[in-house]
Image (cartoon, grey):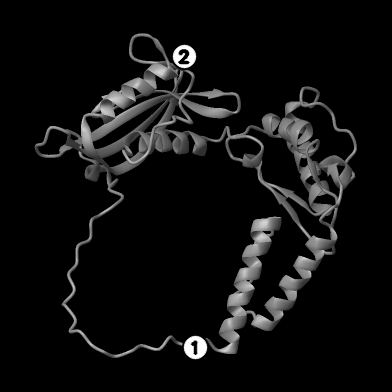
């Protein structure tokens, strides 16, 4: 049996410690009082949290900043957000004043980077920042900028030095990080007996080793598997590699889990290499099959 620790993949340890018993006492502990500066810092934290929740304004203030200055800044941000609460929505293209661009099929391969850099510089000059994912080739990224991002809407307000930051992953979930997340979330849901399995990332069209099966059948197989145990403990998970073949995309991982049989006996330990077949469907990476130590569908 392959051991996960051989790959340095143990992600958790049980830490046991014992503390000496303390004798009972009748002492009454008084709650420590906050200094005026500590109270002001706490108020600032609450204001910053309110701005983040209600307006999406992330707080990047230094802890070394005097709390009085922080308070003034947060109040100015709150006033600004309130004043522009009903601002109209406009396309990013209009906000940044970017003219119509050539279509992604019209630009020669050697000219793509120049067009991309020009667009990014125009956006930055207007206070708009967008990241560039590593998995996208230049033509794919240029297509995203011209067809998706520039035509998306943003709030039409600005201020000196203000930056509007956007993330590619807010528009598309095709990055490799979503493969790992969706497979791992599916495994954790499968192994968590404290909640029902909904299979958010399980495809409507799955496959076992020999034939196509429906999502409903997969959920039934998972139910039967889970019914064999009174407790299941996920122990370790580690991604290995993603491999594309002529018949599909496969995500390899190392996994370990323990299950306590419903009819008693010692817990079962399962660990080793697993593989999941995934497919990009309607803008999301979906799980079409899983084969791992102790279970498969």
Where in the figure is residue 192, as x and y percent of width and height? 33, 39
Q: Residue at x 19, y 67 (%)?
A: 17
Where in the figure is residue 97, as x and y percent of width and height? 90, 45
Where in the figure is residue 260, as x and y percent of width and height? 18, 38
Q: Nearer the viewer, mark 1 or mark 2?
A: 1
Q: Residue at x 62, y 34 (%)?
A: 136
Kindly identify which residue carries mark 1. 33
Kindly identify which residue carries mark 2. 246
The local secondary structure at tag 1 comes to: loop
Q: Is residue 233 left or right of residue 107?
A: left
The residue lying toward the viewer, choosing from 23 and 141, is: 23
Is 90 situated above or below 101? below
Disc 1 crowd, CA 10 A, few/some/many (<14, 14-19, 20+): few
The residue lying toward the viewer, choosing from 14 and 266, is: 266
Q: Earlier in the sequence, mark 1 or mark 2?
A: 1
Q: Is residue 93 left or right of residue 145?
A: right
Locate residue 209: give its quadrant. Answer: top left
Q: Residue at x 76, y 57 (%)?
A: 163
Quadrant where the C terminus is found in the figure: top left
| Residue 297 appears in the picture as rendered | no
CA gap between label 1 and label 2 equals 67 Å
The local secondary structure at tag 2 comes to: loop
Q: Is residue 237 left or right of residue 132?
A: left
| Callout count | 2
Locate residue 35: give its quadrant. Answer: bottom right
Locate residue 237: give its quadrant. Answer: top left
Quadrant where the N terminus is found in the figure: top left
| Residue 84 appears in the picture as rendered | yes
């Amino acid at each position: 049996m392959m051991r996960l620790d051989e790959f340095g993949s143990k992600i958790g340890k049980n830490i046991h410690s014992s503390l000496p018993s303390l004798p009972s006492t009748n002492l009454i502990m008084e709650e420590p009082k906050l200094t005026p500066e500590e109270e002001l810092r706490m108020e600032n934290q609450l204001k910053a949290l309110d701005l983040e929740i209600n307006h999406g304004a992330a707080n990047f203030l230094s802890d070394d900043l005097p709390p009085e200055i922080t308070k003034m800044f947060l109040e100015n941000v709150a006033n600004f957000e309130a004043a522009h609460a009903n601002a109209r929505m406009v396309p990013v293209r209009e906000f940044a004043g970017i003219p119509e661009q050539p279509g992604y099929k019209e630009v020669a391969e050697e000219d793509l980077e120049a067009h991309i850099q020009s667009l990014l510089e125009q956006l930055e000059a207007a206070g708009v920042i967008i990241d560039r994912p590593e998995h996208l080739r230049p033509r794919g990224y240029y297509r995203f900028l011209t067809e998706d991002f520039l035509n998306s809407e943003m709030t039409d307000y600005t201020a000196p030095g203000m930056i509007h930051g956007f993330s590619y992953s807010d528009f598309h979930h095709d990055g490799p990080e979503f493969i790992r997340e969706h497979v791992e979330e599916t495994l954790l849901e499968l192994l968590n007996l404290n909640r029902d399995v909904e299979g958010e990332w399980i495809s409507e069209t799955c496959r076992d080793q020999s034939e196509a099966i429906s999502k409903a059948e997969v959920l039934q197989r998972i139910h039967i598997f889970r019914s064999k145990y009174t407790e299941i403990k996920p122990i370790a998970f580690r991604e290995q590699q993603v491999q594309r073949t002529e018949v599909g995309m496969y995500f390899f991982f190392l996994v370990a889990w323990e299950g306590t049989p419903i009819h008693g006996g010692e817990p079962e330990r399962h660990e080793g290499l697993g593989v999941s077949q995934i497919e990009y469907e309607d803008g999301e990476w979906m799980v079409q099959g899983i084969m791992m130590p102790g279970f498969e569908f």
